[in-house]
Amino acid sequence: MGSPFWISAFLDLPWSSYESGVMFWSEVTGYRVSAPRGARNEFATLVPATGDSHLRAQRLGDGAAGLHLDLHVSDARAAAGVAEALGATTVADHGYVVLRSPGGFVFCFVEHPCSGRAAPAVWPDGTASVVDQVCLDIPASAYDRECAFWEALTGWPLDPLPEDDEFTALERPGSIPLRLLLQRLGERSGEVRAHFDLASDDRAAEVRRHAGLGAQLLAEHPGWTVLRDPAGSSYCITDRSPAR
């Protein structure tokens, strides 16, 4: 199938918190919210000022807030066949194909064309930030298989972080807007889930900005801060350069 030429991330938001969740991420990124689409107006795109979109939102009937990935490929059904051979399970075929990874993480193959990465947002105080990474949160028993699956599926080599065996990155091409980071959780079992990471050139200022928009501070670590958005999803602000 070849490697994906683009990756988008979908915020999966319960009906009751959809409006507040979409508005929060629109303000956090500086992206405008598109007109709704879908049979029930359940989809929207966060549209950057420049470049192609890589963040979207979906209104759920119920359930907790979450996150899933769209992998953009030239032939969604052929890509799904490859994924199944690697251990994925097809959930639905709507022209785009919905699957679950071996560890249970939902992702889709789509054929929507995209090519130009959005520039980081520059805020009035001169700082910059961008949502540039999706971290897959993987229970320990599924970690090795899930790492092997995503490496084989994307064709991107694994890059274990030498300072911390809790994390492994995938080496994305420079044209791809979202990095993929795989985190080994302390819990032994459960389904794989995911969260957003932002790159920021002034983490403290970015955390203050998010708190002013309604985020809740959960934890501070060397190199990143964990917060919760108004829809109930955790995410991180990191010290990675938004220019990379």
Image (cartoon, helix red, strand yellow):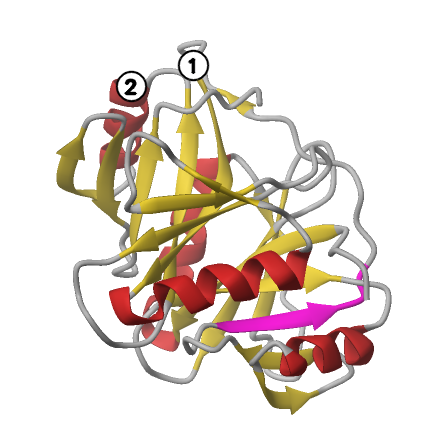
- Dot 1 crowding, Cα within 10 Å, few <14, some 14–19, many 20+: some
Task: Confirm or deny contact between disc 2 and disc 1 (CB under 8 A).
Answer: yes
User: In which quadrant will I find the N terminus?
Assistant: bottom right
Q: Looking at the rendering, in which quadrant would you find the C terminus? A: top right
Q: Residue at x 41, y 16 (%)?
A: 201
35 versus 109 height, above or below: above
Measure the C-alpha gap from mark 2 to mark 1.
Answer: 8 Å
Give amino acid for label 1: Thr
Magenta-colored segment: predominant secondary structure: strand
Q: Which mark is residue 107?
A: none
Of residues 211 and 217, the one nearer the viewer is 217
Question: What's the residue at 74%, 82% (across, down)?
Answer: 81
Residue bearing mark 1: 127
Mark 1, secondary structure of its residue = loop
Relative horizontal placement of residue 158, taking residue 94 as reference (left or right): left
Mark with earlier residue (2, 1):
1
| Residue ID for mark 2 | 205
Q: Which residues are magenta?
A: 106-112
- Amino acid under disc 2: Ala
- Residue 57 at x, y percent in the picture: 53, 62
Give the image location of residue 200, x and y in percent: 41, 24
Query: Residue drawn at (72%, 76%), measured in percent from left and top?
Result: 82
Nearer the observer, 135 or 235: 135
Q: Residues within 10 Å of mark 2 (few under 14, many from 20)?
A: some
Q: Is residue 189 magenta?
A: no
Res. 67 in view:
no
| Residue at disc 2, secondary structure | helix
Q: How many marks?
A: 2
User: Is 168 situated left or right of 205 in this image?
Assistant: right
Q: Is residue 53 visible?
A: yes
In which image quadrant can residue 72 be found? Answer: bottom right
Q: Who is closer to the viewer here, 170 or 64?
A: 170
